[in-house]
Image (cartoon, rainbow, N blue to C red):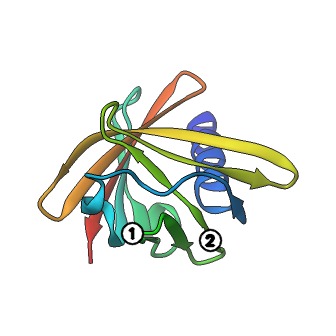
């Protein structure tokens, strides 16, 4: 369980802790993601464990995606801004940038995107973390 918490802490640092992101605006077909989203569930697929995201992260977490490719993430401890990109052919969302002097690039597989919800998978260090979002 400690390893999974460390893996997820790394995910959070790379996803929401980055203060300067680099990338290009989202491609056509990605308008689905534009808007404000709430992370409501986190699942570790290798262990089968699932958690209420607000309880697990000790507060509510939101992401805002804009048409121009800008991105903002709001958490109980960090607000960060940057850019995002969606590849409709590969069904991947990429967020990249600098964090504490290190270039960070995370590619999330879009598992599902319909109605007012989407699901992302992040494969990292032999683990798959599934993130569930709902539009506000």
Residue 101 drawn at (x, y percent): 88, 51
Residue 54 drawn at (x, y percent): 42, 69
The residue furthest top is 126
Disc 2 or 1, which lies upstream in sequence?
A: 1
| Relative vertical location of residue 66 with respect to residue 96 in this rendering, above or below | below
Comparing marks 2 and 1, which lies closer to the viewer?
1
User: Mark 2 — residue?
Assistant: 81
Residue shown at 40%/29% (left/top)?
47
The residue furthest right is 101
Q: Is residue 104 left or right of residue 124?
A: right
Seen from the viewer's position, the closer of residues 88 and 105 is 88
Using a 10 Å C-alpha cutoff, classify the residue at mark 1 as few (fewer than 14 neighbours), some (14 to 19) or many (20 or more).
some
Residue 17 drawn at (x, y percent): 68, 62
| Relative vertical location of residue 49 with respect to residue 72 in this rendering, above or below | above
Q: Label 1: state its secondary structure.
A: loop
Q: Quadrant of the C terminus?
A: bottom left
**Which quadrant of the view contains residue 46?**
top left
Distance of mark 2 from mark 1, alpha carbons?
14 Å
User: Mark 1 — residue?
Assistant: 67
Q: Is residue 48 visible?
A: yes
């Amino acid at each position: 369980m400690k390893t999974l918490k460390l893996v997820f802490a790394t995910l959070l640092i790379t996803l929401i802790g980055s203060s300067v992101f680099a990338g290009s605006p989202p491609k056509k077909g990605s308008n689905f993601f534009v808007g404000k989203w709430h992370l409501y569930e986190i699942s570790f697929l290798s262990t089968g464990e699932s958690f209420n995201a607000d309880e697990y992260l000790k507060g509510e977490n939101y992401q805002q995606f804009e048409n121009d490719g800008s991105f903002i993430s709001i958490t109980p401890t960090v607000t960060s801004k940057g850019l995002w990109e969606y590849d409709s052919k590969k069904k991947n969302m990429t967020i990249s940038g600098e964090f504490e002097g290190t270039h960070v690039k995370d590619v999330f597989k879009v598992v599902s995107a319909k109605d007012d919800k989407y699901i992302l998978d992040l494969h990292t260090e032999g683990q798959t973390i599934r993130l569930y979002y709902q539009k506000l």
